[in-house]
Image: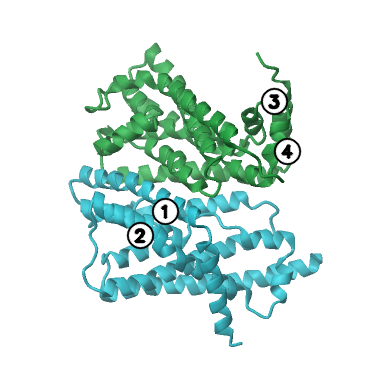
Amino acid sequence: MHPWSTYTVFAALGFRRYSAYRLATAAGAFTNTVFGLLRAPITMAVIGAAGGELAGYGALEGATYAWLTQAVLTPVNVWTWDELAQRIRSGDIAVDLARPVDLQGAYLAADLGRAAFQVLPRGLPPLLVGALVTGLAMPTTALPYVLGLLALTLGVCVSFALRWLVNLAAFWLVELRGVLTLHMVAVGALSGLTVPVHWFPDWLARIAAASPFPSMIQAPVDVLTGRVEGVEALGVIGVQAAWCLGLLLVGRAVLARGVRRLVVQGG
Amino acid sequence: MADLAPYRALLSSRIRSQLAYRRSFALDVAGSAGVGLLEFLAVYVIFTNVTELGGLDFAAAALVFAFANLGFSLADIVVGHVDALPTYLRSGTLDAFLLRPLSVLGQLVTSDVQLRRLGRCAVGVAILAVALPQAGIDWDWQAVLLVVAIPLVGAAIFAAVFVAAAAAQFWLVDGAEFTNAFVYGGSNAASYPTSVFTTPLRAVVTLVLPAAFTAYLPTLLLIGEPGPAWTPAWLGWFAPLAAVLAWAVALTGWKAGLRHYTGTGS
């Protein structure tokens, strides 16, 4: 079998696995929407208090930002994920490594399959409710959506590459819960999930810009809403691609070290 | 008065087990404090751009955030793990609870009290310590009473929300996330001035899910603000009543859930 078709199978499995839990999907979409109902008015109140405009966001753009982040956060997956860590701890990782497929590639394919499934059922309900409750300011041309899909895919890849690295800590640490929580919290604060990165004070904006976190949420949302267009959008996507590639490569190196440690310990 | 000795035994064994791995416990506490701090970061970022939100200045908004966070994390320590009920239902662990001559809710609560969540409490206390002197409070006995009572009443309300959400799990085994909307959505709504919401939403977070009673309304009393129409400050005095009503709903739901439960047969 050609290696690419192997990854397609992993992606399809990722898709199918999540499509099996219909009630859980509906429940998640409901929660995403309720949070949109809370976040849109908070965002609009802040913009109102700032005099009707804040860093390029009017009330409608602010509401759109809140609804759209609620729509993309599940595909990107900002929550704790410890499947790989569990396989490392149980030793099942040895079985995975024995397979004639690249481990990181297989997991990435499965994660992209998961994201592809979640885009519509988790993304559309908050956007539909948003359109009804506050209205949405979305572009009317096709290009931002095409580039936005690419930016969203890269956002998923960056998110995966980071989760992969955090999970590899299981080779060295017995208990990962604290690390997983800190990762989730850093994503929540610096990705633009709760407040737009464009509102950050200078010192925090610099920290965020030097981190991969805005590439996960803020970048896809900026491209999808047409806040950045044309060459500027390509620049944003280029930054995402660089983080994605860099983090995936570091992830490969760390895995190799972890595996050596596993061999030494005979686990 | 029921004999509490069995619960004390359960509780102390759980606490000892959590303190056994000190480094991992310290990391967990840091993680929990991180959650509180970085949630507050959102409020901080907002106030680097505006001077007031929903009629409150930064110090008052920080008080609302800290009271909501403190109440929520106290409730989370004591009863937060009741949201693991679906796991217990699937694995049949709950059946073991049913066999013992102790209250099921009591056993569930004492089965896994989470001390690591003290980290988030500490953040709430620290923000209070900084914001209270800057909020222009008239310090009399009433203000002191409020500062002590708000987190406790808030914790009681959030704990009732946790138990009510767990009760719903008896019907929604695969839909655990439905209740997250109420538990975590409630905590999120409570952390911001209720006045930023539209009127229907304000009615929901005041009357249906009494989140406004955990922080915003009593904070108005504390800082001597009259509050906007529909959510006046004097409503804050009814927070204990809101807690009692919330617990009445939660316990009724819990009892109905237990009656509904028939076991997994495993």
The cyan one among the chains is A
Distance of label 1 from label 2 (alpha carbons):
8 Å
Q: Residue at x 60, y 49 (%)?
A: A178
Q: Badge 2 is on which residue?
A: A124
Which residue matches tag 1?
Answer: A29
Residue at mark 3: B102
User: Compared to B154, does B21 lie above or below?
Assistant: below
Q: CA distance from mark 4 to mark 2?
A: 44 Å
- Report if residue B42 is visible in the image: yes
- Crowding at label 2, few (<14), some or many (≥20) Cα neighbours within 10 Å? some
Tags 4 and 2 both on a single chain: no
Q: Secondary structure at mark 1?
A: helix
- Chain of the residue under the numbered disc 1 shown in the image: A
- Nearer-N-terminus badge (4/3): 4
Q: Chain of mark 3?
A: B
Indicate the amino acid at tag 2.
Answer: Leu
Residue A249, percent across and down? Answer: 56, 74
Q: CA distance from mark 4 to mark 3?
A: 22 Å
**Which amino acid lies under the numbered mark 4 shown in the image of this protein?**
Ser
Chain B is which colour?
A: green
Quadrant of residue B205 in the image?
top left
Residue corresponding to mark 4: B17
Q: Are marks 3 and 1 on the same chain?
A: no
Q: Position of residue A253 (x, y in %)?
A: 62, 73
